[in-house]
Image (spheres, rainbow, N blue to C red):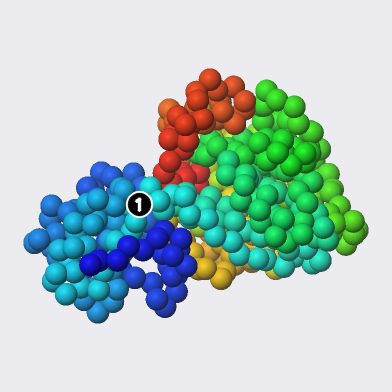
Amino acid sequence: MVRDIEAAELAKILGTDSEPFLLDVREPDEVREWSIPGAHNVPLGELSVRYTEVPRDRPVVAYCAAGGRSRQAADALDRAGYDIANLAGGIAAWGTVYDTVDVPAGTATVVQMRRRGKGCLSYVVGAGDEAFVVDPSLDTERYVKMAAERGWSITRVFDTHLHADHLSGARALAERTGATLHLNPADSFSFDFEPLVDGQRFVLGGTSEMEVSAVRTPGHTEGSTIYVVSSQVVLTGDTLFVDGVGRPDLAERAEEFARNLHRSLKERVLSLDDSTLILPAHYGGTVTVKPTEPVGATLGKLRGALPPLRMDEDEFVAWAAARATPRPPNYIEIVKANMGKSDLPMEALVRLESGPNRCSA
């Protein structure tokens, strides 16, 4: 009997010495749309002639959309003597998995919450008995529970920008906890919030040693904002990733946004010390995620690894503008929802945000 492996269990072993061989048995067009990084694609209908592509010397986990086709593949490979498990619920289940990693920042702790199937990162910054939350997903219960377990009360909620690829939980989390919602008014919202001011500082946990500074960095969106924690850690949103830089979010204004982005990177991010830890809001499929390490990198490392950070303004604008594409229809509706202007029911919105992020250039 082939065993099932839960998506949360799989997340704990990816990026470790126990990482299995991932076998994606969906059709190529499904794989192009969304897959688990590092997976090898052999469609179920081709498995009988391509089974030799699957190694016998390491554990294998097969998956598909919801677990049906991969169950057939796992049964066949089990009969052939492979060490194989089936991902229960398929990639749909993978899309619901979260895990966390703690990052020290002075007297505070930054908890990176990773939405593994989506490649989305959000943060709970805690000190004393208080916590701020940055870029929460719609699953607000996770933040409430995690803060409570650590003795923190959520008092402020922030977004780094108007998100297009996923639903923001910032407004819902603020309403649920009574926290103050802070957003950059340069992005457009139709509900009440406390407008951020460039350079604004928020003391956390009652100690002047722990400050979160909001710094405006337009480029990905007009209201993009980074948050500097204890002068040691920067939550960069979609302005800077570990595997690239943000891209202009509006293709029709790509050159203008690209020029703003270059200026923001140069003046607000690259002016920081090389030891500053960059923690982004997303990561792509080329990033190896390890259970015990945050998705992040020092600014010094990124200076050497990312060519766009070394481009002059004109070169950067030409490069970034060429990579700007019109928002897909589902992104348009997600943006409307995050602005508070969508008429679609929540179930329909949740379906629209399923899949990977596509925010980096």
Identified at 29% across, 52% down, the residue is 67
Of 191 and 175, which appears nearest the observer? 175
Q: In the orientation shown, which residue stands out farthest toward the front?
A: 1
**Could you say where residue 253 lies in the image, as x and y percent from the top left?**
55, 29
Lateral position of residue 333 relative to residue 173, left or right: left
Lateral position of residue 205 relative to residue 60, left or right: right
Q: Residues within 10 Å of mark 1 (few under 14, many from 20)?
A: many
Q: Is residue 318 above or below residue 297?
A: above
Please name the amino acid that badge 1 sits on.
Answer: Gly
Identified at 86% across, 52% down, the residue is 203
Q: Quadrant of residue 49?
A: bottom left
Q: Is residue 62 above or below residue 334?
A: below
Lateral position of residue 19 relative to residue 162, left or right: left
Lateral position of residue 218 relative to residue 108, left or right: left
Tell me the residue that label 1 is attached to.
89
Identified at 61% across, 51% down, the residue is 142
SS category of the residue bearing label 1: loop
Residue 154 visible in image:
yes
Identified at 79% across, 67% down, the residue is 106
**Could you say where residue 163 lies in the image, as x and y percent from the top left?**
58, 37
